[in-house]
């Protein structure tokens, strides 16, 4: 049964302001829609500019605006029209949303659970983001959404509003430089701001491992930081965010500890967010009981940014920094730097620095020269065959002996052929020598491997992304 609040208002017949009006509309929606739909999409909206026949509905970001409009427009319009007793068209907008509604939220019955108890924010309670390992600039406001990260963004933002409730665990995977760290830290930053009493813990898989090793060692020698303290620290988190979780591959003690941490938090409905450079399906040397848990909540990936998103990110950066760069220069950068967002930002900085350093006017021609340098730098940087082999082995968690060996199972053959391809592509070593380097293989085998990967990269975006990721590791080191 649809419940209406109209009587309340027909009785009072007061002239409504937007705040009261919206409060009544939201109350009606809250009763008529599921808690999840209401909390995710509507509780963060506000209304402004009530005119004779229109009202603006302000949503926190463009994705929310799209969803709210699509899912709720007729219901909201009906409710507003009933309450105001005239026909009102809603105009959906993006803008900052006051915390008014958030406070209302804490009065809903869901928020009675311990995790959602209203947290009084007072000055002492506010801990700086950096204390949680968070970069304060990694916020949702600075994160642009496009076709390639839409789902990941939507999940992350609903988690930030309702940690521990809707999507647990959240497993995010994508290649390097595509925005994993930024997005998962945005969750941390938002929770910290909206619910300052919750304990957020952000670390990388590597930090988790190192800290555990330290705790175990100190524990043995009766040092200060014992494994009990380690456990207490991680298991007391309300939101645990672990970046680059793939690092725990092959590390048994870490996996064992992480398994228990995970279970403990999960049982207590604490939010777990994990990011990785690959899908759990592709993990080697991570126990099945862990990968199955990674997959048990919600997963999303981020693809390489398309042209629209690349342009939008550059324009946002330009506007935020108030840099003097014309759109056509930004478009030129977006057209040419297609790999990932980190490289895109690097190119932007390079173009700007080049023009400042040379005093040349910044136009497409100057940008071309500046970017030419980036490409040339990379290409001319000599790469050694062992570096390539090491990067491939690390990426696929296999050993050099396996790559150079004789086994022909899929897990080894693909990395082996990728090694062939990368060595050929990046070093122009002759097939014969590549064959010798990779365990005494015939040059025709190498030719076949190289051309197979070339073809697959054209037809299979996953293969293309894997090869790009490995290349980045090679040039980072
Ligand atoms: P990853 O962790 O996947 O390697 P990062 O999160 O470190 O990638 O992102 C690399 C850079 O690109 C960071 O400076 C980040 O702020 C920026 N970035 C990534 N995705 C976006 C986005 N969608 N909008 C704006 N900036 C982004
Ligand atoms: Mg990262």
Image (cartoon, rainbow, N blue to C red):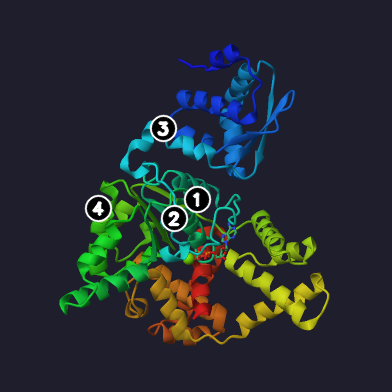
How far apart marks 3 and 2 lie (CA) works out to 30 Å
Disc 2 versus disc 1: distance between alpha carbons? 7 Å
Task: Identify the residue at image location x=57%, y=41%.
Answer: 64
Q: Tell which tag, 4 or 1, sits nearer the viewer.
A: 4
Q: Are marks 2 and 4 in contact (CB under 8 Å)?
A: no
Under circle 2, the secondary element is: strand
**For marks 3 and 2 on the same chain, the one whose residue lies earlier in the sequence:** 3
Question: Callout 1: few (<14), some (14-19), or many (20+) C-alpha neighbours within 10 Å?
Answer: many
Contact check, label 3 and label 2, Cβ < 8 Å? no
Classed neighbour count for the residue bearing mark 3: other residues with Cα under 10 Å, few (<14), some (14–19), many (≥20): few
Tag nearer the camera, 2 or 4: 4
Front label number (3 vs 2):
3
Residue placed under numbered mark 4 in the picture: 264
Which of the marked residues, 2 or 4, is nearer the chain's N terminus?
2
Residue occupying the point 63% across, 18% down? 14
Q: Secondary structure at mark 1?
A: helix
**Vertical placement of 168 versus 379: above or below?**
above
- Which residue in the structure is indicated by mark 1? 152
Residue 293 point in image, percent of width and height = 30, 52
Q: Where is mark 3, residue-wise?
A: 108
Residue 48 to residue 469: above or below:
above
The secondary element bearing badge 4 is classed as: helix
Distance CA(mark 1)–CA(mark 3): 27 Å
Q: Nearer the viewer, residue 379 or 229?
A: 229
Residue 397 coordinates in the image, percent (x, y): 35, 71
Q: Is mark 4 within 8 Å of ligand 2?
A: no
Q: Examine the image and state in which quarter residue 83 appears.
A: top right
Can you tell which mark lies on residue 287?
none
Q: Which label's residue is closer to the chain start, 4 or 1?
A: 1
Asked if labels 1 and 2 touch by Cβ distance under 8 angstroms, the answer is: yes
């Amino acid at each position: 049964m649809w419940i209406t609040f109209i009587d309340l208002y027909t009785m009072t017949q007061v002239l409504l302001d937007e705040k009261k009006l919206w409060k009544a509309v939201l109350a009606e929606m809250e009763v008529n829609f599921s808690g999840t739909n209401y909390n995710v999409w509507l509780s963060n909206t506000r209304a402004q500019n009530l005119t004779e026949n229109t009202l603006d509905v302000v949503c926190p970001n463009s994705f929310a605006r799209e969803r709210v409009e699509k899912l709720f427009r007729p219901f909201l319009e009906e409710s507003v029209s009933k309450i105001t007793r005239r026909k009102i068209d809603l105009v959906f907008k993006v803008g900052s949303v006051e915390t008014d509604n958030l406070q209302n939220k804490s009065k809903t019955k869901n928020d009675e659970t311990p995790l959602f108890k209203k947290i009084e924010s007072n000055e002492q309670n506010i801990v700086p983001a950096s204390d949680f390992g968070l970069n304060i600039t990694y916020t949702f406001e600075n994160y642009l959404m496009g076709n390639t990260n839409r789902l990941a963004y939507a999940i992350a933002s609903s988690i930030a509003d309702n940690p521990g409730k809707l999507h647990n665990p959240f497993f995010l995977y994508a290649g390097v430089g595509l925005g994993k760290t930024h997005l998962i830290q945005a969750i941390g930053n938002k929770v910290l701001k909206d619910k300052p009493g919750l304990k957020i813990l952000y670390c990388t898989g590597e930090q988790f491992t190192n800290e555990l090793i330290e705790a175990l060692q100190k524990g043995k020698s009766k040092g200060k930081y014992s494994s009990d303290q380690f456990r207490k620290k991680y298991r007391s988190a309300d939101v645990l965010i672990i970046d680059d979780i793939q690092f725990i591959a092959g590390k048994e003690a870490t996996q064992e500890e992480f398994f228990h941490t995970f279970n403990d938090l999960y049982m207590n409905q604490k939010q777990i967010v994990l990011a990785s450079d690959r899908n759990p399906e592709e993990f080697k040397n991570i126990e099945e009981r862990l990968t199955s848990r990674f997959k048990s909540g919600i997963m999303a990936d981020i693809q390489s940014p398309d042209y629209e998103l690349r342009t939008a990110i550059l324009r946002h950066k330009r506007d935020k920094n108030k840099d003097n760069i014309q759109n056509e220069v930004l478009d030129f950068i977006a057209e040419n730097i297609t790999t990932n967002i980190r490289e895109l930002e690097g190119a932007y900085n390079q173009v700007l620095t080049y023009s400042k350093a040379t005093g040349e006017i910044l136009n497409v021609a100057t940008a071309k020269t500046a970017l030419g340098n980036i490409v040339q730098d990379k290409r001319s940087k000599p790469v050694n065959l062992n570096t390539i082999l090491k990067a491939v082995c690390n990426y696929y968690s296999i050993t050099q002996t396996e790559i150079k060996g004789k086994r022909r199972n899929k897990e080894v053959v693909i990395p082996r052929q990728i090694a062939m391809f990368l060595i050929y592509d990046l070093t122009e070593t002759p097939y014969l020598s590549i064959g010798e380097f990779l365990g005494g293989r015939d040059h025709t085998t190498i030719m076949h491997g190289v051309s197979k990967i070339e073809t697959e990269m054209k037809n299979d975006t996953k293969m293309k992304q894997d090869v790009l990721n490995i290349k980045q590791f090679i040039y980072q080191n």
